[in-house]
Image (cartoon, rainbow, N blue to C red):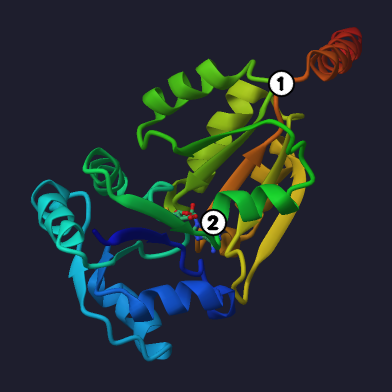
């Protein structure tokens, strides 16, 4: 039988395309891509002429058996997504699971992943973290999700769409407080890359005051719950309140 290769591609800068990723895509019999047209740019830039086939959330049900059949016939198949590591907030789970179920060898060809790149540069604790992917689009559901994560002591990693970053940051501030450590990682590996480590309150102001920060691709890394810091913050807030009340 053939092998299923799970191949990472760049998240912006083509120079992050590894030699092994390139060779794997060149030598396999078929590339299963999230969007064949999108991946066409990378493939043609590296003169990779391997046939491609679309494999995404909407056709995985029918595509998976087809690809498993080809693997069983001895073809090597590479799975790629539009950017970064397949399956990380990207399609491919059903294909990889089916390959294991069919006794087919699955081999990762690692490379860029926005979540890990953001975490590595965030300056936030990286010994324990939780990847949370995309938050719900609607405020109510989003706040509910955040409430559930409020006391999590691990560093939390979120993907966010540019048109939702302001709303999300406001919800983060509301639920986690203005003083929680956070890092905004935007356009990683690209021309307008921004890595800004600060607090949630300051990040919200930063994004509010600069429309450019509401563009492009964004990862938010949030420091975990820290009981000591929380007490300090409450004390500061209490003191401020007392002073304000005295002034009244
Ligand atoms: N599989 C990809 C990976 O390994 O990172 C993630 C795919 S997910 C559909 C796309 C999201 O990843 C974007 O909305 C953004 O949150 C994040 N992302 C991807 N590329 C990025 C980049 N260059 N800079 C910042 N965030 C990025």
Residue at figure coordinates x 11%, y 50% from the top left: 65
Question: In the rendered image, which quarter is residue 211 located in?
Answer: bottom right
In this picture, residue 104 sits left or right of residue 243: left
In the depicted structure, whether residue 180 falls above or below residue 57:
above
Would you place residue 223 above or below residue 239 in this image?
below
Q: Earlier in the sequence, mark 1 or mark 2?
A: 2
Quarter of the rendering containing residue 248 = top right
Callout 1: CB less than 8 Å from ligand 1: no
> At 27% from the left edge and 81% from the top edge, which residue is drawn?
50
Observer-nearest of 142 and 12: 12
Vertical side of 218 occupied by 246: above or below? above
Identify the residue position indicated by label 2 in the image.
Answer: 113
Q: Nearer the viewer, residue 120 or 32?
A: 32
Q: Secondary structure at mark 1?
A: loop
Q: Is residue 12 visible?
A: yes
Name the disc covering residue 225, or none: 1
Distance of label 1 from label 2 (alpha carbons) = 25 Å
Q: Nearer the viewer, mark 1 or mark 2?
A: 2
Image coords of residue 195 (percent x, y): 71, 58
Query: Quick check: is the Cβ at mark 2 less than 8 Å away from ligand 1?
Result: yes
7 left or right of 190 in image: left
């Amino acid at each position: 039988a053939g092998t299923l290769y799970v191949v990472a591609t760049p998240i912006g800068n083509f120079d992050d395309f590894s030699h092994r990723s390139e060779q794997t895509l060149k030598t396999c019999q078929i590339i299963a891509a999230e969007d064949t047209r999108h991946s066409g740019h990378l493939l043609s830039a590296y003169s990779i002429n391997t046939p491609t086939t679309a494999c995404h959330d909407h056709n995985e049900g029918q595509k998976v058996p087809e690809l498993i059949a080809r693997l069983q016939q001895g073809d090597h198949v590479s799975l790629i997504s539009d950017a970064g590591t397949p399956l990380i907030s990207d399609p491919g789970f059903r294909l990889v699971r089916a390959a294991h179920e069919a006794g087919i060898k699955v081999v990762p060809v690692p490379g860029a992943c926005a979540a890990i790149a953001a975490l590595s540069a965030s300056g936030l604790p990286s010994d324990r973290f939780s990847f949370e992917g995309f938050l719900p689009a609607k405020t109510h559901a989003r706040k509910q999700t955040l409430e559930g994560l409020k006391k999590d002591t691990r560093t939390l990693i979120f993907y966010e769409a540019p048109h939702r970053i302001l709303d999300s940051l406001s919800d983060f501030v509301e639920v986690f407080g203005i003083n929680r450590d956070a890092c905004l990682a935007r356009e990683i590996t690209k021309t307008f890359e921004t890595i800004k480590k600060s607090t949630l309150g300051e990040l919200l102001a930063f994004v509010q005051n600069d429309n450019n920060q509401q563009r492009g691709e964004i990862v938010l890394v949030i420091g975990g719950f820290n009981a000591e810091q929380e007490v300090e913050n409450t004390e500061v807030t209490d003191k401020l309140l007392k002073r304000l009340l005295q002034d009244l």
